[in-house]
Amino acid sequence: MTILIKILQFVLSLSILVIIHEFGHFIMAKLFKTRVEKFYLFFDPWFSLFKFKKGETEYGVGWLPLGGYVKISGMIDESMDKEQMKLPPQPYEFRSKTSWQRLLIMLGGVVFNFVLALMIYVSVLFVWGETYLPTSNVKYGIVTDSLGHSIGLRNGDKLLSVDNREIENFMQVTTDIVLNGRKTIQVERDGQIVNIDIPKDYVPQLLKGKGQISWRAPFPPFVIQSFGKESPAKKAGVLANDEIVGIDSVKFTYYDEFQKYLADNKSKPVVLNIMREGKPVDITVTTTAAGLLEVRGVGKSLDQIFELKTLKYGFLESIPAGISKGFKTMGDYLKQFKIIFSKETKAYESLGGFITIGNIFPGVWDWNSFWNLTAFLSIILAVMNILPIPALDGGHVMFLLFEVITGRKPSDKFLENAQIVGMVILLGLLVLANGNDIIRLLRK
């Protein structure tokens, strides 16, 4: 059920973004009296799921959910309609319009996606406000793994600042380190301030999911909710709704201590001290080679552990706040491009496809999260589409800017070849991103 909810949210979000993007092209084309032959959600090679014609435009839904398109008369696009381009230009065709009109038509999708993101952020802040975990409220300190320990961090350290700059929102700490090239972390340990240097090889490992800095959570409660496929705990007789209160009669104060105890006893029998319907039960379980029980537990929610902060906005206050959030989100996303293909970070190895995108949605339907994620994806779609790659809007914009500046229009043959090259590049990126998803699944 969780996977189905994720898929439904992803498809709905993608549909909204594609429709808005293509509507941007559509409305600008209509503004300049340019004929739009097709307006499709998703692609329709060979056949469509649904279609109807109104006026001069065919509207429909394709079966291949990789995006969508509008087919504009007299334009070299992914349809590669060469026959139309051999005919004399017509007044209603894209190629008959002035260069600045064609430029605005091509920018329509990107502009509409960005405006949509701003409108969503404004609406979300007005309806729900913004809730976050202040760094100063992470009262039990941080928790990290062996990579974090190797640079000098310790579980229980209270994070004070990064490069001597306070990070108000604790969830932004890792993002700030990665995107802004931070050099130091300041923590409080045993009443003393400790300055920790961030080595160059730390960020590449962060991008691979190692060395993450998270909040430290108290233990117990740990109520078992479900089991993995080969759970040794289930085989030993542990039941759903059992509460683990200790191991080998050892009590734990924090969840990371519980994890460490299991890791120190890989492939060894341990005695789980369990409370079942109010009665103590001891069950011997042999942990996996990775020191796991293969159980999924539930404890207190984040707002039950920490004091969260919620900023409320009136209607007029939400407008500048939402716009500011949209521009900041776009700025942070643009910063990622300098590290994606860096040899040092090897961030391209962390690129994800549809599985990665789908997994960012929560396993339960939450409209607040849905709209925040849709706004974020709308900005991603806008930025990706404006990249100067043939076959993307940015490729068309690049050639149109060349025409505006030089007064020379690239030949139709050149544009056809550029379109093919762009489609090959996009296909390669698609294979790389989704290939990374598959590799990560196989490694699990």
Image: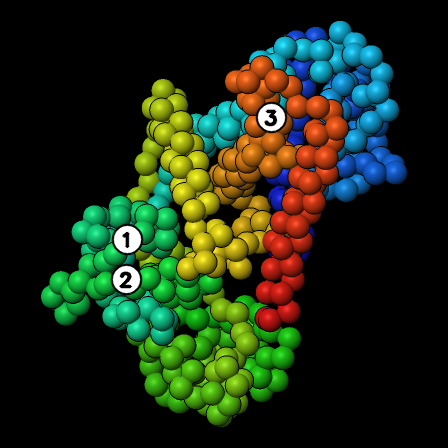
Q: Specify which label sits upstream in the sequence, 2 or 1.
A: 1
Q: Which residue is mark 1?
A: 182
The image quadrant where one finds the C terminus is bottom right
Q: Nearer the viewer, residue 414 or 370?
A: 414
Q: Specify which label sits upstream in the sequence, 2 or 3.
A: 2
Q: Are marks 2 and 3 in contact (CB under 8 Å)?
A: no
- Disc 3: CA contacts within 10 A as few (<14), some (14-19) or many (>=20): some
Determine the secondary structure under disc 2.
loop
Determine the secondary structure under disc 1.
loop
Q: Which residue is mark 2?
A: 198
Look at discs 2 and 3 and give the one toward the viewer: 3
Q: Specify which label sits upstream in the sequence, 3 or 1.
A: 1
Amino acid under label 2? Answer: Ile
Residue 347's disc is none
The image quadrant where one finds the N terminus is bottom right
x, y percentage for residue 43?
77, 37
Q: Which residue is mark 3?
A: 399
Residue at the farthest left position: 192
Residue 30, compared with residue 262, is above or below; it is: above
Res 1 visible: yes
x, y percentage for residue 108?
59, 21
x, y percentage for residue 52?
84, 23
x, y percentage for residue 192?
11, 66
Number of numbered discs visible in the structure rendering: 3
Q: Is residue 45 left or right of residue 156?
A: right
Residue 364, compared with residue 438, is above or below; it is: above
Amino acid under label 3? Answer: Phe
